[in-house]
Image: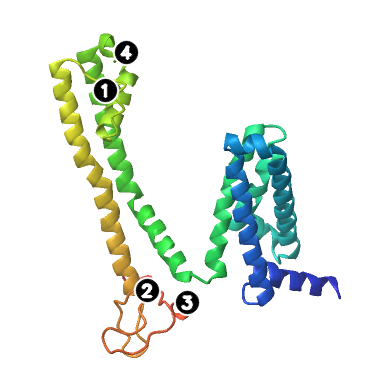
C-alpha cells in the first residue's frame, strides 16, 4: 500500500462521516472526550481526588496521549495541514491537549482541559444535524448585527452606574461602607442588575431614595438588550425565510425546516440540498 493511499484511507476515517469506519471513529472519539471530561470533573472533587488521585493522573495522561496522536494524525493525513491547524476545530483540538502539558509547569492549568467539551460539537457533524448549525449561525449573525446598539447601550449604563456610584459616595460616605467612588460604582452595578449582595447598603433616607430609583431603573434597563436582540433576530429570520424558495412556484417565506410549500403544497428540497439564491449587488438583501 503506497503512502498516498494510506493517507487517503486515514483521511476518510478521521475526517469523513459517510463511511461506517468514519462514523465508528467519530463515535469512539466522542466517548473518549466525554470520558476524559468525567475524569477531569471528578478529579476536582476532594473526596474523589484523595482516594483515586493516582488513577486519575494515569487516565489523564492516557487521554492526553490519545488526543495528541489523533491531532498529529489529522495533521498528517489532511490535504491542507495548515488550513486544518488554523480552523476552528483545529485550534480546539490543540487547546484540548495543551493544558496537560502546561500542568508540568503550572499545576492548576490541567483544569483548563474542560475546553475539551467544545470538541463534543463534532456530534453535529456526525449526526448531520445541519439544521442546528444553521440556527447557531443565525444567532451569531444576530449578535453581530446587534453589537453596535448593545455597545451604545452598555456605554450609557456605564455612565449611569458611575453617576449613581459617585452620588452614593457623596451622600453615604465612608462611615456607611461607601469608602470610595469605585466602591460606590460596585454597589450601583449590583443594584442596577438586581443582584444585591447586601455587603454595601445605604443607611440615610436620601441614600435609600437614590437606591430605590436605581433599582427601578435596573428593571427597565434589563429589557433593553433583550429588545435589541429580539428585533434583530426577527429581521434576520424574515430575511432567511425569504431565501427558502419553492421549486414549483418559486415563492419564498418558508421556515428552514419546512418540508412542503405553504403556497402550492409542493415538496421542498431537503434542508442540506436547498439552493439558496445569492442576490446581485444591486438587489436588496
In the rendered image, which quarter is residue 111 located in?
A: top right
- Residue at the (46%, 65%) spot, across then down: 133
Question: Are the residues at dot 3 and dot 4 in contact (C-beta closer than 8 Å)?
Answer: no
Gap in Å between the C-alphas at discs 4 and 2?
A: 56 Å
Gap in Å between the C-alphas at discs 2 and 1?
A: 48 Å
- Residue at the (75%, 73%) spot, across then down: 9
Q: Secondary structure at mark 4?
A: loop
Residue 88 in view here = no
Disc with the residue nearer the chain's start (2 vs 1): 1
Circle 2 residue: 256
The quadrant of the picture occupied by the N terminus is bottom right
Circle 4 residue: 179
Residue 276: x and y, percent? 42, 77
Circle 1 residue: 165
Gap in Å between the C-alphas at discs 4 and 1?
A: 11 Å
Residue 250: x and y, percent? 33, 86
Q: Secondary structure at mark 1?
A: helix
Residue 69: x and y, percent? 75, 55
Q: Which mark is residue 272?
A: 3
169 to 81, vertically: above or below: above
Q: Secondary structure at mark 3?
A: helix
Give the left or right position of residue 183, taking residue 52 as reference.
left
Disc with the residue nearer the chain's start (3 vs 4): 4
Amino acid at each position: 500500500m503506497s503512502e498516498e493511499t494510506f493517507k487517503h484511507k486515514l483521511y476518510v476515517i478521521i475526517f469523513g462521516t459517510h463511511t461506517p469506519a468514519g462514523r465508528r471513529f467519530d463515535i469512539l472519539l466522542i466517548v473518549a472526550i466525554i470520558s476524559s471530561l468525567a475524569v477531569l470533573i471528578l478529579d476536582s472533587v476532594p473526596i474523589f481526588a484523595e482516594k483515586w488521585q493516582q488513577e486519575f493522573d494515569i487516565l489523564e495522561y492516557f487521554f492526553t496521549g490519545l488526543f495528541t496522536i489523533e491531532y498529529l494524525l489529522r495533521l498528517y493525513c489532511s490535504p491542507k495541514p495548515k488550513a486544518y491547524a488554523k480552523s476552528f476545530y483545529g485550534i480546539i483540538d490543540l487547546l484540548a491537549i495543551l493544558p496537560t502539558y502546561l500542568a508540568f509547569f503550572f499545576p492548576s492549568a490541567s483544569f483548563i482541559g474542560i475546553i475539551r467539551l467544545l470538541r463534543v460539537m463534532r456530534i453535529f457533524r456526525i449526526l448531520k444535524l445541519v439544521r442546528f448549525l444553521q440556527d447557531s449561525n443565525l444567532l451569531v449573525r444576530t449578535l453581530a448585527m446587534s453589537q453596535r446598539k448593545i455597545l451604545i447601550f452598555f456605554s450609557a449604563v456605564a455612565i449611569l452606574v458611575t453617576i449613581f456610584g459617585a452620588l452614593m459616595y457623596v451622600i453615604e460616605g465612608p462611615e456607611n461602607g461607601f469608602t470610595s467612588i469605585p466602591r460606590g460604582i460596585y454597589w450601583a452595578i449590583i443594584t442596577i442588575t438586581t443582584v444585591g449582595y447586601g455587603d454595601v447598603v445605604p443607611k440615610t433616607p436620601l441614600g435609600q431614595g437614590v437606591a430605590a430609583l436605581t433599582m427601578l431603573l435596573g428593571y427597565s434597563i434589563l429589557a433593553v438588550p433583550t429588545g435589541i436582540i429580539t428585533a434583530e433576530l426577527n429581521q434576520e429570520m424574515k430575511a432567511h425565510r425569504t431565501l427558502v424558495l419553492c421549486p414549483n412556484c418559486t415563492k419564498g417565506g418558508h421556515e428552514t425546516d419546512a418540508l412542503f410549500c405553504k403556497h402550492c403544497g409542493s415538496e421542498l428540497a431537503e434542508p442540506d440540498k436547498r439552493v439558496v439564491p445569492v442576490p446581485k449587488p444591486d438587489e436588496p438583501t
